[in-house]
Amino acid sequence: MGASVQEISLKNTNLAAPAYYIIAPSECSSNLSRYDGVRYGYRCEDPKNLDDLYIRTRGEGFGAEVKRRILVGTYALSEGFYDAYYVKAQKIRRLISQDFSDAFDEVDVIMGPTAPNTAFKLGEKTDDPLSMYLSDVYTIAVNLAGLPGMSIPAGFANNMPVGLQIIGNYFSEEKLLNVAHQFQMNSDYHLKSPVE
Protein backbone atom coordinates (compact mmCIF):
# COMPACT_ATOMS: atom_id res chain seq x y z
CA MET A 1 0.00 0.00 0.00
CA GLY A 2 3.00 2.29 -0.45
CA ALA A 3 4.44 2.09 3.06
CA SER A 4 8.05 1.15 3.67
CA VAL A 5 8.89 -1.25 6.49
CA GLN A 6 11.75 -0.55 8.84
CA GLU A 7 12.79 -2.47 11.94
CA ILE A 8 13.27 -0.46 15.12
CA SER A 9 14.56 -1.23 18.58
CA LEU A 10 12.65 -0.55 21.78
CA LYS A 11 15.34 -1.86 24.07
CA ASN A 12 13.61 -1.24 27.41
CA THR A 13 10.22 -2.76 26.63
CA ASN A 14 11.24 -5.94 28.44
CA LEU A 15 11.01 -3.84 31.62
CA ALA A 16 7.50 -2.57 30.83
CA ALA A 17 5.48 -5.34 32.51
CA PRO A 18 7.24 -5.19 35.90
CA ALA A 19 7.12 -1.37 35.88
CA TYR A 20 3.47 -1.30 34.82
CA TYR A 21 2.42 -3.74 37.53
CA ILE A 22 3.94 -1.41 40.12
CA ILE A 23 2.72 1.89 38.65
CA ALA A 24 -0.84 0.91 37.67
CA PRO A 25 -1.77 -0.68 41.03
CA SER A 26 -0.16 2.25 42.87
CA GLU A 27 -2.24 4.73 40.89
CA CYS A 28 -5.27 2.49 41.33
CA SER A 29 -4.76 2.40 45.11
CA SER A 30 -4.31 6.16 45.30
CA ASN A 31 -7.21 7.06 43.00
CA LEU A 32 -9.71 4.59 44.46
CA SER A 33 -9.09 5.63 48.06
CA ARG A 34 -11.80 8.30 47.70
CA TYR A 35 -14.44 5.63 46.93
CA ASP A 36 -15.39 5.07 50.56
CA GLY A 37 -19.17 5.22 50.28
CA VAL A 38 -19.37 8.58 52.01
CA ARG A 39 -19.03 11.00 49.09
CA TYR A 40 -18.14 8.80 46.10
CA GLY A 41 -19.10 5.50 44.61
CA TYR A 42 -21.12 2.55 45.82
CA ARG A 43 -22.45 2.55 49.41
CA CYS A 44 -23.43 -0.57 51.34
CA GLU A 45 -26.88 -0.75 52.86
CA ASP A 46 -27.56 -0.24 56.58
CA PRO A 47 -24.01 0.11 57.93
CA LYS A 48 -23.67 -0.38 61.71
CA ASN A 49 -20.96 2.27 62.11
CA LEU A 50 -18.30 4.11 60.12
CA ASP A 51 -15.87 1.17 60.12
CA ASP A 52 -18.61 -1.15 58.88
CA LEU A 53 -19.48 1.37 56.15
CA TYR A 54 -15.90 1.47 54.86
CA ILE A 55 -15.24 -2.26 55.11
CA ARG A 56 -18.50 -3.43 53.56
CA THR A 57 -18.63 -0.70 50.91
CA ARG A 58 -15.19 -1.59 49.57
CA GLY A 59 -15.72 -5.31 50.06
CA GLU A 60 -18.99 -5.30 48.16
CA GLY A 61 -18.23 -2.51 45.67
CA PHE A 62 -14.89 -3.69 44.31
CA GLY A 63 -14.29 -6.93 42.41
CA ALA A 64 -11.44 -9.35 43.07
CA GLU A 65 -9.11 -7.82 40.46
CA VAL A 66 -9.60 -4.29 41.76
CA LYS A 67 -8.96 -5.45 45.33
CA ARG A 68 -5.81 -7.24 44.18
CA ARG A 69 -4.52 -4.08 42.52
CA ILE A 70 -5.35 -1.90 45.51
CA LEU A 71 -3.42 -4.22 47.83
CA VAL A 72 -0.35 -4.35 45.56
CA GLY A 73 -0.46 -0.58 45.05
CA THR A 74 -0.83 0.18 48.74
CA TYR A 75 2.17 -2.04 49.45
CA ALA A 76 4.28 -0.39 46.73
CA LEU A 77 3.46 3.08 48.04
CA SER A 78 4.03 2.25 51.70
CA GLU A 79 6.94 3.61 53.71
CA GLY A 80 10.14 1.76 53.00
CA PHE A 81 8.92 0.47 49.63
CA TYR A 82 8.05 3.69 47.80
CA ASP A 83 11.64 4.38 46.70
CA ALA A 84 12.46 0.72 46.12
CA TYR A 85 9.46 0.07 43.87
CA TYR A 86 7.43 3.07 42.74
CA VAL A 87 10.28 5.51 42.11
CA LYS A 88 12.30 2.89 40.21
CA ALA A 89 9.25 1.97 38.13
CA GLN A 90 8.78 5.64 37.22
CA LYS A 91 12.42 5.80 36.07
CA ILE A 92 11.81 2.78 33.85
CA ARG A 93 8.70 4.48 32.50
CA ARG A 94 10.87 7.42 31.44
CA LEU A 95 13.36 5.11 29.66
CA ILE A 96 10.51 3.42 27.77
CA SER A 97 9.06 6.77 26.76
CA GLN A 98 12.48 7.86 25.46
CA ASP A 99 12.79 4.64 23.42
CA PHE A 100 9.52 5.44 21.66
CA SER A 101 10.53 9.05 21.14
CA ASP A 102 13.77 7.91 19.48
CA ALA A 103 11.86 5.42 17.30
CA PHE A 104 9.45 8.10 16.09
CA ASP A 105 12.43 10.09 14.81
CA GLU A 106 12.75 7.26 12.25
CA VAL A 107 9.19 6.03 11.57
CA ASP A 108 5.64 7.40 11.31
CA VAL A 109 3.85 4.55 13.11
CA ILE A 110 4.87 1.37 14.87
CA MET A 111 3.07 -1.88 14.10
CA GLY A 112 3.20 -5.19 15.88
CA PRO A 113 1.04 -7.82 17.52
CA THR A 114 -1.54 -6.76 20.07
CA ALA A 115 -1.07 -9.88 22.19
CA PRO A 116 1.27 -12.87 22.28
CA ASN A 117 -1.65 -15.20 21.60
CA THR A 118 -5.04 -15.18 19.92
CA ALA A 119 -8.17 -13.94 21.62
CA PHE A 120 -9.45 -16.02 24.53
CA LYS A 121 -12.75 -17.80 24.35
CA LEU A 122 -15.38 -15.97 26.40
CA GLY A 123 -14.74 -16.59 30.12
CA GLU A 124 -11.74 -18.84 29.44
CA LYS A 125 -9.08 -17.09 31.57
CA THR A 126 -11.15 -15.49 34.32
CA ASP A 127 -9.67 -17.77 36.99
CA ASP A 128 -6.08 -17.22 35.84
CA PRO A 129 -5.12 -13.56 36.40
CA LEU A 130 -1.45 -14.19 35.61
CA SER A 131 -2.29 -15.38 32.08
CA MET A 132 -4.46 -12.35 31.61
CA TYR A 133 -1.68 -10.04 32.86
CA LEU A 134 0.82 -11.61 30.45
CA SER A 135 -1.55 -11.07 27.53
CA ASP A 136 -0.99 -7.33 27.96
CA VAL A 137 2.76 -7.58 27.43
CA TYR A 138 2.74 -5.86 24.00
CA THR A 139 0.39 -3.02 24.96
CA ILE A 140 1.81 -2.13 28.38
CA ALA A 141 4.82 -0.14 27.10
CA VAL A 142 2.51 2.00 24.96
CA ASN A 143 0.35 2.77 27.99
CA LEU A 144 3.38 3.63 30.13
CA ALA A 145 4.66 6.01 27.46
CA GLY A 146 1.23 7.64 27.14
CA LEU A 147 1.08 7.12 23.40
CA PRO A 148 -2.02 6.68 21.24
CA GLY A 149 -2.46 3.12 20.03
CA MET A 150 -5.17 0.92 18.62
CA SER A 151 -5.76 -2.68 17.71
CA ILE A 152 -7.42 -3.72 14.50
CA PRO A 153 -8.34 -7.18 13.17
CA ALA A 154 -5.48 -8.68 11.15
CA GLY A 155 -6.52 -12.25 10.49
CA PHE A 156 -7.11 -15.53 12.28
CA ALA A 157 -5.00 -18.28 13.84
CA ASN A 158 -6.69 -21.52 14.88
CA ASN A 159 -10.02 -19.88 14.04
CA MET A 160 -9.47 -17.13 16.64
CA PRO A 161 -8.89 -13.45 15.80
CA VAL A 162 -5.44 -11.90 15.77
CA GLY A 163 -4.95 -8.19 16.45
CA LEU A 164 -2.53 -5.78 14.80
CA GLN A 165 -1.45 -3.00 17.13
CA ILE A 166 -0.73 0.37 15.56
CA ILE A 167 1.08 2.92 17.72
CA GLY A 168 1.41 6.60 16.92
CA ASN A 169 3.53 9.43 18.24
CA TYR A 170 2.11 11.99 20.66
CA PHE A 171 -0.75 13.98 19.10
CA SER A 172 -0.69 11.94 15.89
CA GLU A 173 -4.11 10.35 16.24
CA GLU A 174 -5.16 11.52 12.78
CA LYS A 175 -2.24 9.68 11.17
CA LEU A 176 -2.88 6.60 13.32
CA LEU A 177 -6.55 6.45 12.34
CA ASN A 178 -5.69 7.00 8.66
CA VAL A 179 -3.20 4.10 8.67
CA ALA A 180 -5.81 1.82 10.27
CA HIS A 181 -8.44 2.97 7.78
CA GLN A 182 -6.14 2.30 4.81
CA PHE A 183 -5.38 -1.19 6.14
CA GLN A 184 -9.08 -1.94 6.51
CA MET A 185 -9.84 -0.56 3.05
CA ASN A 186 -7.37 -3.15 1.67
CA SER A 187 -8.40 -6.11 3.83
CA ASP A 188 -11.61 -7.73 5.01
CA TYR A 189 -10.53 -9.10 8.40
CA HIS A 190 -12.74 -6.56 10.19
CA LEU A 191 -15.78 -8.05 8.45
CA LYS A 192 -15.12 -11.66 9.52
CA SER A 193 -16.00 -13.59 12.67
CA PRO A 194 -14.66 -16.90 13.99
CA VAL A 195 -16.50 -19.93 12.66
CA GLU A 196 -18.14 -21.90 15.48
Image (cartoon, helix red, strand yellow):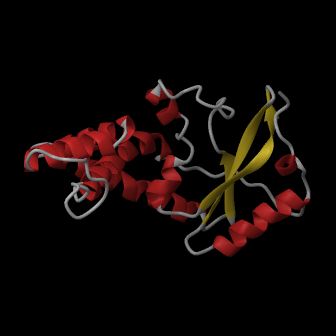
Residue 179 seen anywhere in this rendered image of the structure: yes
Give how far across and how far down residue 92 sits, in percent: 36, 51
Residue 83 against residue 126 in the figure, above or below: below
Q: Residue at x 84, y 64 (%)?
A: 182
Give how far across and how far down residue 139 sits, in percent: 55, 48
What is the quadrant of residue 39 in the picture? bottom left
Q: Quadrant for the N terminus, please.
A: bottom right
What is the quadrant of residue 144 in the picture? bottom left
Q: Residue at x 63, y 73 (%)?
A: 172
Q: Residue at x 69, y 74 (%)?
A: 174
- Front-most of residues 189 and 48: 48
Residue 7 against residue 162 in the figure, above or below: below
What is the quadrant of residue 122 in the picture? top right
- Front-most of residues 42 and 24: 42
Residue 73 seen anywhere in this rendered image of the structure: no
Give how far across and how far down residue 69 sits, in percent: 32, 41
